[in-house]
């Protein structure tokens, strides 16, 4: 009997977050992701509180890196794959994920910052 060469990788768990991207931020993110030609990028957000207020930088992960992150984090039950406003996003700093669950994300300089919803 021949071995099955079509091994199906398990799909990572994806959690929807409630934040949205400002229109200009979405355009900038789309342009950033489309600038990659050597691999198919997956958007990543990296948190920092070193500036005046908490913010996120963009990174483009290759699919192999995403698969490794998913495998590592799922080993202890954590999720790193999210959907923000229809965009697939990897957020490895899971301690700060609540900051992406509401409000609007827009660029201040080269970093994304969250504007809390009006009723917060």
Image: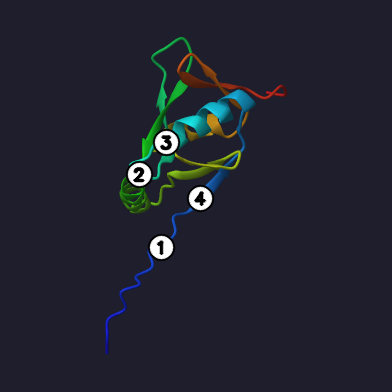
User: In the structure shown, which secondary structural element does the residue marked by tag 4 occupy?
Assistant: strand
Residue hosting label 3:
44
**Disc with the residue nearer the chain's start (3 vs 2):** 2
If the image is split into quadrants, where does the C terminus sit? top right
Q: Which mark is residue 39?
A: 2
**Disc with the residue nearer the chain's start (2 vs 1):** 1
**Disc with the residue nearer the chain's start (1 vs 3):** 1
As displayed, is residue 3 above or below residue 95?
Answer: below
If the image is split into quadrants, where does the N terminus sit? bottom left
Nearer to the camera, 9 or 33: 33
As displayed, is residue 56 above or below residue 42?
Answer: above
Would you call the spot at circle 4 few (<14 residues within 10 Å), some (14-19), or many (20 or more)? some
Q: CA distance from mark 2 to mark 1?
A: 21 Å
Would you call the spot at circle 1 few (<14 residues within 10 Å), some (14-19), or many (20 or more)? few
Residue hosting label 4:
14
Q: Nearer the viewer, mark 3 or mark 2?
A: 2
Q: What residue do we see at 59% from left, 42% from top?
A: 86
| Image location (x, y in percent) of residue 64 | 31, 50
User: In the structure shown, which secondary structural element does the residue marked by tag 2 occupy?
Assistant: loop
Residue hosting label 1:
10
**Disc with the residue nearer the chain's start (4 vs 2):** 4
Q: What residue do we see at 47% from left, 54% from top?
A: 13
Would you call the spot at circle 2 few (<14 residues within 10 Å), some (14-19), or many (20 or more)? few
- Position of 75 with respect to 53 (left or right) is left
Residue 34 visible in the picture: yes
Circles 4 and 2: CB distance less than 8 Å? Answer: no
User: In the structure shown, which secondary structural element does the residue marked by tag 3 occupy?
Assistant: strand
């Amino acid at each position: 009997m021949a071995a099955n060469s079509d091994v199906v990788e398990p799909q990572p768990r994806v959690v929807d977050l409630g934040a949205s991207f400002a229109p200009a931020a979405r355009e900038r993110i789309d342009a950033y992701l489309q600038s990659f030609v050597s691999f198919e990028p997956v958007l990543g957000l990296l948190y920092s509180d070193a500036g005046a207020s908490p913010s996120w930088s963009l990174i483009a992960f290759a699919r192999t890196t995403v698969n490794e992150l998913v495998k590592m984090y799922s080993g202890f039950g954590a999720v790193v794959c999210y959907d923000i406003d229809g965009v697939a996003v990897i957020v490895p700093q899971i301690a700060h994920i609540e900051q992406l669950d509401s409000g609007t994300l827009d660029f201040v300089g080269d970093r994304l910052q969250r504007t809390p919803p009006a009723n917060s």
